[in-house]
Every structure is written in structure tokens, then in C-alpha cells.
Amino acid sequence: MGIHFDEKKQTFSIDTANSTYQFQVDRHGFLLHLYYGKKISGNADYLLKYLDRGFSGNPACLINDRTFSMDVLPQELPVWGSGDFRSPAFVVEKEDGTRSVDLKYVTYQIRKGKYSLPGLPAVYVSDEEATEAETLEIVLEDSVLSLEVDLLYGVLPKLDIITRAIQIKNKGADTVYLDKLMPASLDFITGDYDLITFHGRHTMERLMQRVPINHLSQRIGSRRGASSHQFNPMLIAAKPETTDSFGDCYAMEFVYSGGFQAEALKDQFGTTRVQMGLQEEGFHYPVAFGETFTSPEVILSFSRDGFDRLSHNLHDVIRQHICRGAYQYQPRPVLVNSWEGSLCNITRDSLLSLAREGKEIGLDMLVVDDGWFGNRDDDNTSLGDWYANEEKLGGSLAQLITDVNRIGLKFGIWMEPEMISEKSHLYEMHPDWALQIPGRIPIRGRNQLVLDFSRKDVRDYIYDRICDILDSGNIEYLKWDYNRSIYDVYSEGVTHQGRVLYDYMLGLYEVLEKLVNRYPHVLIEGCSGGGGRYDAGMLYYTPQIWTSDNTDPIDRMLIQYGTSFGYPASTMAAHVSKSPNEQTGRVTPIQTRVIAAMYGSFGFELDLSLLTKEEKKAAGEEVKKYHRLERLITDGRYYRLSDPAKDKFCAWSFVSRDGAEALVNAVVLKLQSNDELFYVRPKGLKPERVYKEINTGECYDSDLLMSAGLPLPKESGEHRAYQFHFILQQ
Ligand code: GLA
């Protein structure tokens, strides 16, 4: 395992437990990608064939060699200007508008430990793990532009994880502009692949789509300034025959929360290129003499055993090497959130009675969502005025916190720090703090504007306001929301507006980093109209994210299923809400809503006084049960047991790492008269053993369970849900 350089063949091999990644410095100093996939011991350079191909030009350094073309060969970092007409990963423009890069290999370094990226979230390792992790740095140079380009590879061998990032150093006198940067670009020399992406919309995020990669360019991404509800910055390339439990597949996951782009295509000779990186539209980043630009990183992983294994690799890297802080592994508070129950119409009495009802069913925390500050009686006003509305709260925020604590609940609060309402004191004082283009009326989203987080004075002000709020009492949780997209990009005083969106993200990360350091005991939950910024970048600061504004348990099956491909259960906040559901009007049994919410970080979001006595009793029992099961859900291995887009039921399970217990869940999605039985087939149990289902006391042969399955009870009634808890017998 580890990184090796074969001097003779000038080949770099990155070996993880089950994969090899290989590229070569060719005789002209170009970096050619050779192989990524199942672990190998040989050199893959024999795969390359040098042929004279028409209309595929030959690099300037070659005289009379028509058999070498960057348009044909697989590349480690395809650049614009080399003769490669496929999608480039790196485009640079000079002041005069010329665009051409010619990168040649200079040197390399292999280091122990995993690199970090200044000002950016990134996979990290602890001091003890640093001996296993490795970094490979490849230095490339364009001697005409005097540009140094450093390719960084981070390796976590046991998890089959490789990360890629790029640093660009301008050593020349002239400023250059970065127009496109994809830190991850993979060329698969042979083979057919499918592209799996996760698209969606507000209240319906991360729906899986699988299509063949063909002779056309397929591109996903976000131009919205945030990673978005519409596409998640995660994709999978898989052999057509690959399933959850079989076959080769590759993941790319961006550790970044702003605009992104990913592309897949098959070129003229059948090579498949898959890339992920920064959104190129709106990105025109000046790098002046002496400056260094650092890209965010992309996480790569390979599995030869299908998507389950690939997801496990991603779950482990996110939970163990992206999420941080006191709540990385700690049980999360089971909370009740005021939003769906009261919207902005909260009062001291409504909040305290919610807290009391919550206490009655054994909850840990009250979260006061929107409506507690400024004149915020609806969602048209007051963002930026982060002062408690004492009239509404019937006293100070400090007093409310004390009273909630006295009831026996922890206290959490909602904020939307990156936003400003035009109807606010902050806007009256600082209209230029909002992103808007001089001479144009800004586009509103939810009737609000976005604060210019690329500006230090703006960030410092907001940081101080957040600290004032967090210092005003015993606040143990902050929900960090972000409820619109960025349309108008203009920041006062910058040399070029093409840098603003990227600087905005660096600014956001700076504020979050300062908060995480100053308030290590505060759990920050990420949110953007639910899951509009559900990415590995945010998870570096917020170990859980509000998965979706849609709390309908049936819709949630598709949303949580899609999310599960790239993100562990511990990151998914999921709440029990009222029935009929606020978003869909669908009526579902409480048991179904509870089981759907036990998919991740569990909570409630409804007026608890609406629950009947029986429902309250049941809810109390479920809260106790969740506390017993939480470790299994967050630390166990997660398996998908059906495809909710095709099957009539959605089933999934959590299996403890030692195989001693398994929690199998199923929600019936469609009901028909006199239907066939639905069999759920658990995965990941110990073979040739017996498991007992603890609710019924029935014992099962593990191989039989895994091959033939367990029939769901045949009950009438829409959208029933079931949970089976299996314990390994000695
Ligand atoms: C967003 C969030 C909700 C809630 C509201 C408050 O939509 O996703 O959970 O906090 O804002 O305005």
C-alpha cells in the first residue's frame, strides 16, 4: 500500500487496500493517466498506443512525430492549449485574452500524512493516523507563463480514498486569470460506463439518475453560488453491470459548497473522461505575481464490489475525516424544532409549552427556529438584525434560554447569517453590504438579498453578532440556514468580479472555522431550504444537515435513499412531523413517520400538543428506542435493501460493525389489493449463523434471510412501516 515511484518507467502508483491509481511522466515531460481501478501490481503503460490520428495535432516539442497527440492520450490534468479538444480541466487566460497552457513535469515529493488546504475544508487525519496517510505532490510548470501547478494527492489507504487538489503559483510578472479548474479529471482508456448523478429541487433533493456515458457531453452542476438542491456535488461512474453488491464503480465527491460542475463524456476513440471541479461560468480568478490559488479538493473512491462498498468508503471518510468537533461521534440531541408547528408565529408561551411537551416525551432539546429576532413576523423582513425580539419572547433571550433549561431541555437557535432583508436596520445602514450590481435592481429570492461574505468588514460584523447571540445564554445548537441563490455578483473594491463567488465561499468558511473553534461544544446544523447545500464542504463545520424541507416520510424515502450514496446517516437530520403532512398533505401513521426519521439524526418538528394521548405515549417510547439504537444507526454499516424509485417498498438496514445486531427498516410505498408479498433481504449479516428478531422472538438462519428474505406483514392501510431488530445468537 502507499505511493510508489518507478524511476525506470517514470510511473507513479498509488495503492490503497483494494485499488491502484497510476500515471506516468512520459518521455516529453507530459503527465499521462494510465489506470484507476482494481488493485494491480504491473505497469499499465502498455495500454497506450501511439498512432497518427487525423485532426489530432502534435505538441510543439515534437518534431516530425505525428503519432503523439494530447487529443488522444489519457491525461492526468488536461489543459486547454495542448491540442486536447476534449473537455479541459484547466483553462488560463492572459490579460490579452490568449488562452494556452503547456505544463511539463518538474519534480515530485512523497510525504507522510495528508495535506491540508489553506482556508478550505479538506479530508484530515489525526496525528496517529498520519503515519498511514500519505501525500503525493507533483510539480508541473509552464515556462512561458511562469506558472507552477502543483497536483496534490492525499491517500487514506485503508478506506480506498484518494483526494485531489491543485495549487497554482504565479511566478511571472503578468497577472493570469483562471477560467476553469477541475481538480479531479479521470480518463478511462477502455470500457463502457454509466453515470449516476443526484438531481432534484427544493423539497425533493438528491434523486438518483443512471444513464450510459455516450458520445456526448453530459454535464451537471450549480450556477447558484451554492452546491444546490438541483444537483449534488457527488457522482458515480460505474460499469453497466454494477449493482449495489457487485461490480466496479468510482465516486467523486467535491469538498466544496459553492458552484460546481461535473462532466462525463466518451471521446472519438472510446476513452471516457469524468471530471469534477469549480463552476466555470462566473469564474475568472486573477492570480497576480507571487500569488497562489488553491482549489478545493475532490474525494475519489473505487469499489469492485458495487455501490454498497463505495458508499461505505464515502461514509467512513465523511464521518471520520471530514466531520469534526465534539459531536463528530457523540449522540446528537433528540430535538423538537418550532418551524413546521408555528412558522414565525412563536411566542414565549408557545415555545415554553413546546418545551414542556417535549420534556414529557423525553426529548433533549428545543430549537427556536425562524421568527425570534428583529421584526420577523414573516419571511419578508429583518434578516441581518440579529437582536432578539423581546416583545415576542416576553423578555430577554437569556431569560428564555434559562426557562427552557429549567424545564430540562437544552436550547438551540436558528440563524441565517449570510442574508440581509431590504427591510432591516442593517440594510438601512449598509446597503452596499448586499451583493448587487450598481445600476441594476437586484433579483430577490424569498424577498431577501445575500450579504457580501467576500468582504472582511461584513464577515467581521456578522461574526460578532453571532457571538453576541451565542454568548447570551446556554445555547448548545445553531441551525445555520441559507435560503436563496446568488444572482447578482458585484463586490466593491475588488480588482475583478470574477473572483467574488470563490472569495465568498472562502469568507463563509473563515467565519464557520472561527465559530467552530470558539464554540466547540455547540452543534451546528447546516441547512439551505433543507438540503440545498448538502455537501462535504459544509460537513467539515456542521456534522449534520437538515436533509430536506420535505418531512413527508414517503417522499423522504427517495431523498434519504439518494443521499445515502455519498453521505452517512449521522449527517442526515430527519424529523417526525404532523399528518396530514405540511408539504404534501399526505396522511401517514405515526409509526411510519418515526421509522422514516430514524434514518439519521432524529427529532420532531410539529406542535406536540396536537398528538393524541396514545400518540404521545408511542412517541415517548420511540424516543427511548432511538436512544438505544442510535449507536447502531450512526456507527453501523448502512445498506440499501430496495430501490424506492422502482420497488413498492423502501427498505434499508444498519448492521453493527461486528455483525452482532442489525436494524432492518421497511416502508411500504404503494398499496394494491391482493398484492404479492414483499420480501426484504438483509445484507451484511454473519454467514452461517442464527439471528433472533427481538420483537417476535423468532430465530432465522442468516444465509436464508440474506438470500430468500423476510416477508413483510400483509396488513391493509396505506404506508405502513416496519422495523426488525436482529441479534446474533451465540
Ligand atoms: C428554511 C429551512 C426551514 C426553516 C425555514 C425558516 O426553509 O429549511 O427548516 O428553518 O427556513 O425560515
Image (cartoon, grey):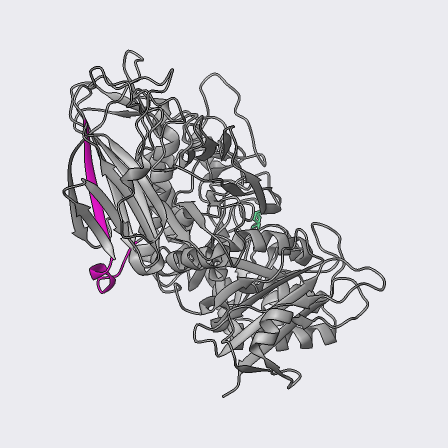
Most foreground residue, 46 or 490: 46
Most foreground residue, 124 or 90: 90
On whether residue 65 falls in the magenta region, the answer is no
Q: What's the magenta region?
A: 124-141
**Residue 458 horizontal side relative to residue 564, left or right:** left
On whether residue 135 falls in the magenta region, the answer is yes
- Residue at 31%, 25% (x, y): give it: 70
**Residue 342 horizontal side relative to residue 71, left or right:** right
Most foreground residue, 176 or 710: 710
How many discs appear? 0
Residue farthest to the top, as pictured:
96
Residue 290 shows up from this direction:
yes
- Residue at 37%, 29% (x, y): give it: 500
Coordinates of residue 617 in the picture (x, y in percent): 68, 77
Residue farthest to the bottom, as pictured:
730
**Residue 284 horizontal side relative to residue 265, left or right:** left
Coordinates of residue 606 in the picture (x, y in percent): 65, 61
Most foreground residue, 149 or 283: 149
Residue 122 shows up from this direction:
no
- Residue at 22%, 49% (x, y): give it: 135
Question: Which image quadrant is residue 329 in?
Answer: bottom left
Coordinates of residue 285 in the picture (x, y in percent): 32, 26
In the rendered image, the vertical position of residue 15 relative to residue 291, given as above or below = below
Coordinates of residue 23 in the picture (x, y in percent): 27, 40
**Residue 495 horizontal side relative to residue 479, left or right:** left
Q: Quadrant of the N terminus?
A: bottom left
In the rendered image, the vertical position of residue 53 relative to residue 136, given as above or below = above
